[in-house]
Image (cartoon, rainbow, N blue to C red):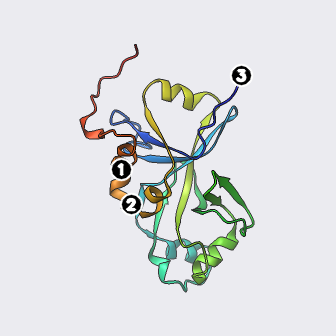
């Protein structure tokens, strides 16, 4: 059986999603294969917490103008783990490539670059990630918990945070506010 990977796609929580970890979220799937899935939520800002707070915690001098950039709750798994989602570059020590244009980096070298203002021009600082066991995400998709759309860097990096959920669905021609909360299968 050929496996259809959904890596480099956005999972858009349906309006009926009541799990507080994922309600009204947009999650970038970074890895998706027969062993399970890993993604990061791109529209849930951690209030009153910024990149400078993360840098100070890591004892990295805060020098860049972007130090006030928001930090996102990437998901409920390992919320202490910091990662940077960015335009792809292989210059960092530990980067997972996500599609052709994106990378997810966990090494400290990117944090030093961000503090110095020499990091990627477009990036999101994330704490934690979302994970699904083998077959779990496929089951949730069959249960209509998610919409799935190709990843769009403009939605990830340029769209205002509070608009990412509705605009991610709009790229599929779907207005989330008009969807029925009743689901069924033919």
Q: How far apart are labels 1 and 2 at the CA level?
A: 8 Å
| Residue 43's disc number | none
Asked if the residue at tag 2 contacts the one at tag 1, i.e. Cβ–Cβ closer than 8 Å, the answer is yes
Image quadrant occupied by the C terminus: top left
Vertical placement of residue 163 versus 22, above or below: below
Residue 61 picture quarter: bottom right
Looking at the image, which residue is at 54% across and 71% down? Answer: 54
- In percent of width and height, residue 147 lies at 43, 36
Question: Relative to residue 28, is residue 46 depicted above or below?
Answer: below
Residue at image mark 3: 1
Left or right, 33 with respect to 153, comes to right
Residue of label 1: 167
Task: Label 3: state its secondary structure.
Answer: loop
Where's the N terminus, which quadrant?
Answer: top right
User: Residue at left 53%, top 25%?
Assistant: 139
Counting residues from the start of the chain, the first of labels 1 and 3 encountered is: 3
Q: Earlier in the sequence, mark 1 or mark 2?
A: 2
Q: Nearer the viewer, residue 153 or 30?
A: 153
Query: Residue 16 at what x, y percent from top left?
Result: 34, 32
* Mark before the other along the chain sequence, 3 or 2: 3
Q: Residues within 10 Å of mark 2 (few under 14, many from 20)?
A: some
**Cα distance in 3D space between marks 1 and 3:** 34 Å
Question: Label 3, label 2: how many angstroms apart (C-alpha)?
Answer: 37 Å
Check disc 2 and report its element: helix, strand or loop: loop
Residue picked out by circle 2? 159
User: Which residue is at the front of the view, 59 or 175?
Assistant: 175
How many residues crowd around disc 3 within 10 Å: few (fewer than 14), some, or many (20 or more)?
A: few
Report the residue that reaches farthest toward the left.
178
Query: Closest to the observer: 93 or 156?
Result: 156
As drawn, the residue found furthest toward the bottom would be: 63
Where is residue 36? Give x, y as percent. 65, 35
């Amino acid at each position: 059986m050929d496996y259809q990977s959904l890596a480099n796609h956005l999972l858009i929580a349906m309006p009926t999603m009541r799990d507080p970890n994922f309600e009204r979220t947009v999650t970038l799937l970074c890895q998706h294969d027969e062993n399970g899935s890993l993604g990061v939520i791109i529209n849930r800002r951690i209030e009153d917490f910024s990149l400078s707070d993360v840098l100070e915690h890591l004892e990295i001098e805060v020098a860049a103008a972007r130090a006030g950039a928001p930090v996102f709750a990437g998901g409920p798994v390992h919320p202490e783990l910091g990662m940077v989602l960015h335009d792809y570059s292989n210059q960092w020590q530990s980067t997972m490539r996500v599609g052709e244009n994106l990378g997810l980096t966990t090494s400290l070298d990117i944090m030093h670059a961000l503090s110095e203002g020499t990091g990627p021009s477009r990036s999101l600082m994330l704490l934690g990630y979302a994970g699904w066991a083998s077959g779990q995400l496929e089951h949730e998709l069959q249960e209509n918990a998610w919409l799935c759309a190709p990843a769009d860097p403009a939605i990830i990096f340029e769209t205002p945070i509070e608009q990412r959920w509705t605009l991610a669905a709009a790229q599929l021609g779907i207005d989330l506010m008009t969807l029925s909360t009743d689901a069924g299968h033919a």
